[in-house]
Image: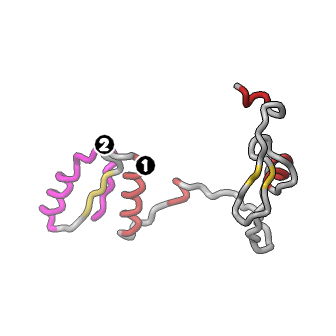
Amino acid sequence: HQVFLEIGPHPVLGHAIRECLDAGGTSGLTLPSIRRRENESERFAASLGSLHNLGVAVDWSVLQPAGRPVTLPRHPFRRDRHWTEPRPVAQVRLGHRDHPLLGRRTDRTEPTWQARLDTEDLPYLAD
């Protein structure tokens, strides 16, 4: 064997395996399954990726079981936007209704409102 995956909480056998390989005149590689102070799932995935890159047959179905097929729409995706806003908000935005503080939207190109503030119409302004 030339590739070893050490299963344990921290790699401790890598040096011993290296000495055995060197004594036998064989090249080889040891990989840790996890290491202290490292994200376990990231380390494990990186080691499995290294095994795969080295030509080791990894049974990926054990880690990621096959999902169930889903039906997808057969028509192309249309990038239409659909706004959902309450009707009173839309009426104020479109200038069809006065906003209690902003008033009525003017016809200018930039968003502009004109309002008459009166404590008789809006008594809470007196506070």
Q: Which residues are magenta?
A: 1-25
Q: Outermost residue toward the bottom?
A: 76
- Expressed as whole percent of the image width and height from the top left, the position of residue 93 reads 79, 54
Q: Nearer the viewer, mark 2 or mark 1?
A: 2
* Looking at the image, residue 99 lies above or below residue 70: above
> For the residue marked with disc 2, what is the amino acid?
Arg
**Residue at 72% in and 27% down:** 126
State which quarter of the image contains the N terminus.
bottom left
**Residue at 75% in and 53% down:** 113
Please name the residue that numbered disc 2 is placed on. Answer: 37
> For the residue marked with disc 1, what is the amino acid?
Ser
* Looking at the image, residue 54 lies above or below residue 82: below
Q: Residues within 10 Å of mark 2 (few under 14, many from 20)?
A: few
- Expressed as whole percent of the image width and height from the top left, the position of residue 112 reads 72, 56
Q: Secondary structure at mark 2?
A: loop
Q: Is residue 9 left or right of residue 120?
A: left
